[in-house]
Amino acid sequence: RLLASSLLVDPGRHWLLADPGYPCNRHFLRLVEGGAQLVPVGPETAYQLTPSLVQQHWNADSVGALVASPANPTGTVLSADELAALSASLHARGGHLVVDEIYHGLTYGLDAASVLQVDDSAFVLNSFSKYFGMTGWRLGWLVAPPAAVPDLEKLAQNLYISASSIAQHAALACFSEEAMAIFEQRRQAFQQRRDFLLPALRELGFRIEVEPQGAFYLYADVSAFTDDAQAFCAHFLETEHVAFTPGLDFGFHRSNQHVRLAYTQEVPRLQEAVDRIARGLKHFR
């Protein structure tokens, strides 16, 4: 992210980003003296940017858009056709497309399309963090058009030099048959957890209008219970010892009415969390 923002965003210029979205994206832009044009999105567009939204929000300071598929915090996925339409809309305006594909591999019932299937000039962010379970190793990669590589190499040389040797050796171990079998088992476990937690929360009154197709999050509308998601999360943390995240962490669009829940625990523990949430909701009825 830092390399792409440093290369593509001059001071005072900005990318279009979905709101809600991963918060560090706008922070990296701020770091390079650029900015984020946050575009409010909702279930009607599966919380993703569309060509129509690009048309509405593009201005003289816009230089591109960053989207995520699968997305954090919503888990939604862009199809190849949707990526192609976004690419065409941006290129028509002289902009570039950057796609966060870090959750690729963690999808359920489909394979997420890569933007490189439809646009070989796009920039792609990826990492060993999610599918390969190497969160904290800080090992990722950026796929870029050949013309951009020399300048990216100069930036990388000054910012990072290279990934640590131990991280690179650990990453190589990910590609063994034994490791890949573990990753596939874990993906199936995530799907089972999603399939348990999604209907359980809906039954409690959480509104989740778009079924996530990837990642390991549920982005839920809690307006039936509160208009202060931060206080809502604090209540459950302090009284029921269940942790989830207020929408404010991911943007500003209806953030006080949304929370993100991660299904990174096994189903019996998720069942316990659901029971505690059901008990804690009595405070809000």
Image (cartoon, rainbow, N blue to C red):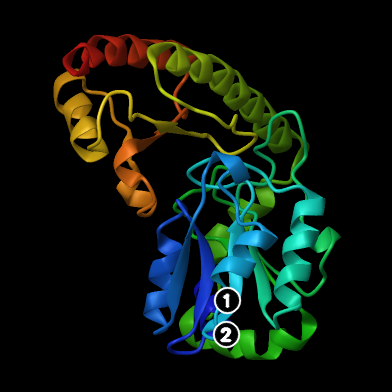
Residue type beneath disc 2: Leu
Determine which quarter of the picture holds residue 150.
bottom right
Q: Position of residue 87 (x, y in %)?
A: 75, 67
Cβ atoms at labels 2 and 1 below 8 Å apart: yes
Give me the C-alpha separation between circle 2 and circle 1: 5 Å
Q: Examine the rendering and report whether any part of residue 116 can be seen.
A: yes
Which residue sits at x=70%, y=73%? 90
Q: Quadrant of the C terminus?
A: top left
Q: Is residue 156 visible?
A: no
Q: Give SS at disc 2.
A: helix
Residue lying furthest front: 56
Q: Image quarter for residue 272?
A: top left
Q: How many marks?
A: 2
Residue toward you, 62 or 34:
62
**10 Å crowding of disc 1: few (<14), some (14-19), many (20+):** many
Q: Please, what secondary structure does the residue beneath circle 1 have?
A: helix
Q: Which residue is mark 1?
A: 4
Q: Residues within 10 Å of mark 2 (few under 14, many from 20)?
A: some
Q: Is residue 117 above or below residue 186?
A: below
Q: Residue 208, how many percent across, how many down?
A: 49, 28
Report which quarter residue 283 is drawn in: top left
Q: Give residue 44's position: percent from left, percent from top.
A: 59, 41
Above or below residue 239? Residue 116 is below
Q: Which residue is mark 2?
A: 7
Query: Identity of the amino acid at label 1?
Result: Ala
267 vs 256, nearest the viewer: 256
Identify which residue, 119 or 87, lies in the foreground.
87
Which residue appears at 63% of the width and 69% of the height?
A: 55
The percent coordinates of residue 258 (x first, y second) are: 36, 37
Could you tell me which residue is drawn at 78 percent across and 83 percent down?
146
Q: Which mark is residue 206?
A: none
